[in-house]
Amino acid sequence: MQQGSDSAGAAGRIYTAALVIIGNEVLSGRTQDANTAYLATRLNDLGIRLIEVRIVRDEFDAIAKAVNELRAACDYVFTTGGIGPTHDDITAEAIARAFGRRLLEHPEAIARLARHYAHSEFTPARRRMANVPDGGTLIDNPVSAAPGFRVENVFVFAGVPKIMQGMFESIRHELIGGAPLLARTIRTNLAEGRIAEPLGGLQDDFPDLEIGSYPHFNKQGLSVRLVLRGTDPVRLGAAVDRLRDIIVALGGSAEDVDISAS
Amino acid sequence: MQQGSDSAGAAGRIYTAALVIIGNEVLSGRTQDANTAYLATRLNDLGIRLIEVRIVRDEFDAIAKAVNELRAACDYVFTTGGIGPTHDDITAEAIARAFGRRLLEHPEAIARLARHYAHSEFTPARRRMANVPDGGTLIDNPVSAAPGFRVENVFVFAGVPKIMQGMFESIRHELIGGAPLLARTIRTNLAEGRIAEPLGGLQDDFPDLEIGSYPHFNKQGLSVRLVLRGTDPVRLGAAVDRLRDIIVALGGSAEDVDISAS
C-alpha cells in the first residue's frame, strides 16, 4: 500500500508484498502451488506481509495487468514461473511490456549461461533466458544458472520451488521490512457459533491484533483453531490469557498448538 | 471474458471462471489452499476454464474489488471462505457491498439453521450465517447446514474443503460450459533448452492446442513434462505423434504419463 499509516503501533509502518504465480499448470489443477507458503513464511520473518496472491494464465496481458496493479499497491511484488527457454515462457517479455521498457540481452546473463552450457549446447532457446527488461538487475540462480531479474520493486523468479527458493535467498538482503508478525494458536473443542460473541469482543479490545477462527475436520469431527497475530509479544500474551478464560468459562478445552512466527 | 470469439474452434465459445480465496490464513503460509485444484478439475469436466485465482485478505475492500473485477471478466466467479459465525467472517457483507445491495436475513436460511441447531444453541452469531445479499439464492450445505449463496454469476462457498466440495456439487447443474479441455502428457529426459525450438514450431502448427513445458526435480535430477491440451482428441493425437517424432530424432525418451481430462 506504500502506506504511512501506523496500524502496527510502535512497530512502525507495515511493509506489504504480493505474489503473481504465472502458470496455466496451476490453473488446470495439475500442479499444486508450493511457492506461496514458502514466500509467506520467509517474508513474515523479514517483517513483510503477503497481502495478495494472483494465479494468472501464461498470457502477456494477464501477467502485465496483475504486475502493474500490484506493484502500485504493494512495497514488493514477486513473480514465479515462465522464465525458461520454451515458447510458453513469456514472463520477461510480459514484464518489459508492463514497465514499457525494451527487452534486451543482458551481457552478464549471457556470460553466465555460456559458462553453464560450455560442455553442452548454448542453443538460441537457452540464449533467450538472458533477456531482461532494460535497466533490470540479475537475480542469482544457484541451481541452474539462468538468472531471474529485478525491475524496481518487482522480483522475477523461476517457478520450480527449489530454484525459486534459491533466488529468494539470494535477494532477501535487498528487502526492507518492519516488525515480524508473531502468532499464537489455541485449539478448542468449542464450536465457532458458541465462542463467536466473546471472540468478537476480544477482537474489539485488541484492535492491534488480528484474531482469526478456523474450523477444520479431523478424525474427531470439526475442531477450531483460534489464531492471534501481532507484533507485540506482551499484547499477544495478554490476549491469549483472556481467550483461555473465555474458553474455560464456556466449558471448553484450550490447547496451545504452537508458539511461532507467522 | 464473456467472449464470442471462437478460439475453441468447432467446440464453440470458451466458458471461463475465476476463484477468489478469502483467507488471511492462506496468505500467512499456515494453511495450504486445497480448493483450487478441486475446482479447476471439476470445472474442466464441465468445459469451463479457470483463468484466474486471487487470494485476498479478510477485508471488505479487498474482497469486493476482486469480486467486481472478476465477475465482469469471467462467466463465473467462485469465492471460498469467510461465511462462518465469527467476527472475521465478512464475506456476505463484502459481497453485498460489491453488488451495492442490502444484506438481509434469508428466511429459508434461518429455517435451516434453526432446525440444525434445534438441540443446541441458535446463538445470534449462528443467526448471522443466514445473512445473504438481497436477491441472493441459497446454496445447499450438505455437511453443516449453514448455506452458501449465489448472486448473479458469483457463487459463495465455505472454505473448509469438505463443505466447499459439497456446495460445488449442489450447484454444478446450474453451470453451463463448452467442450472439456483434454490433456496428454509426455515425459522426456531431454532438457528444455534442447527441445524448445521444435516445440515452439509444433505450437505454431497447432494453434488450437495449448502446449506447455514444465521442468521439475526428481531423484534423477531435472526432468521435463510436456503437456498438450485441446478440445479435439484427433488434433491432440496428431500433435502427440509429431512430438514423439521430435523427441526421438533428438535422441530422447518419450513416455506417455497419462491420458486424462484436464
Image (tube, coloured by chain):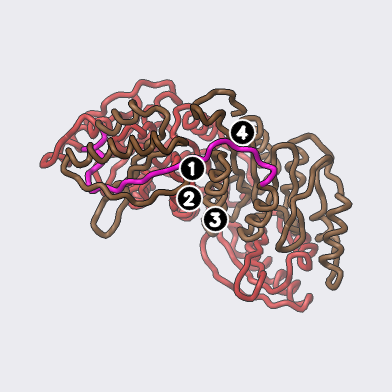
Chain colours: A brown, B red
Tell me the crowding category of disc 1: few under 14, some 14 to 19, or many 20 or more residues within 10 angstroms, Cα based.
many
The residue marked by circle 3 belongs to what chain? A
As for residue A175 lying within the magenta part, the answer is yes
The residue marked by circle 1 belongs to what chain? B
Name the kind of residue labelled 1 in the image.
Answer: Leu
Q: Distance between the residues labelled 2 and 1?
A: 8 Å
Residue A207, image x and y in percent? 39, 27
The verdict on a common chain for dots 2 and 3 is no
Up the image or down, B5 lies above or below A80; here it is above
Q: Earlier in the sequence, mark 2 or mark 1?
A: 1
The verdict on a common chain for dots 2 and 4 is no
Residue A74 - label: 4
Q: Which residue was labeled with disc 3?
A: A34
The magenta segment is A173-197
Q: Is residue A69 left or right of residue B154?
A: right
As for residue B198 lying within the magenta part, the answer is no
The residue marked by circle 2 belongs to what chain? B
> CB under 8 Å between callouts 2 and 1?
yes
Residue B127, image x and y in percent? 23, 31
| Circle nearer the viewer, 4 or 1 | 4
Q: Quadrant of the N terminus of chain B?
A: top right
Tell me the crowding category of disc 3: few under 14, some 14 to 19, or many 20 or more residues within 10 angstroms, Cα based.
few
The residue marked by circle 4 belongs to what chain? A
